[in-house]
Image (cartoon, rainbow, N blue to C red):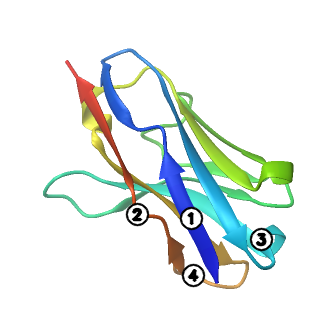
Amino acid sequence: QVQLVESGGGLVQAGGSLRLSCAASGRTISSYIMGWLRQAPGKEREFVASIRWTGNYMYYAQSVKGRFTISRDNAKNTLFLQMNSLKPEDTAVYYCAARGLTEVKWVYWGQGTQVTVSS
């Protein structure tokens, strides 16, 4: 089992920044791919970014590339998402998720944290 707890969401004006954190716990954390996904009102959940826990392979959705940065602190078992130049369309509930290297679907999820960007 992997437990994930997000924090850092809030209300910010367009052009501002926020940093989300995800505290992970459980066995074999180092073997998981970690990611951020988001769900806006009335829309399907979508991929934002992912990173391998033991490597530097990072992937981003085109909509956030160049503005968001995913990173992790292995010593603290914490995942981050630095969000800069925020836009109103970034408003969503952001979820931290984890999956094994050979799995296609995200298996473990956090409870989500709300990010609201005002225009």
Q: Which residue is mark 4?
A: 104
**Image depth: mark 4 or mark 2 in front:** 2
The answer to whether residue 94 is left or right of residue 103 is: left
Asked which secondary structure carries label 2, the reply is loop
Asked which secondary structure carries label 1, the reply is strand
**Image depth: mark 3 or mark 4 in front:** 3
Say whether disc 3 or disc 1 marks the residue closer to the N-terminus: 1
Asked which secondary structure carries label 4, the reply is loop
Point 79% across, 50% down: residue: 76
Asked which secondary structure carries label 3, the reply is helix
Q: Amino acid at mark 3?
A: Ile
* Placement of 74 over or under 87, stated as above or below: below
Say whether disc 2 or disc 3 marks the residue closer to the N-terminus: 3
Please state the horizontal and vertical placement of residue 5, each as a whole percent of the image. 53, 59
Give the quarter of the image for residue 95. bottom left
Q: Amino acid at mark 2?
A: Gln
Q: Which residue is mark 1?
A: 4
Mark-to-mark CA distance, 1 and 2: 8 Å
The answer to whether residue 117 is left or right of residue 97 is: left
Q: Which residue is mark 3?
A: 29
Mark-to-mark CA distance, 3 and 1: 11 Å
Residue 73 or residue 16, whichever sits in front = 73
Please state the horizontal and vertical placement of residue 30, each as a whole percent of the image. 83, 68
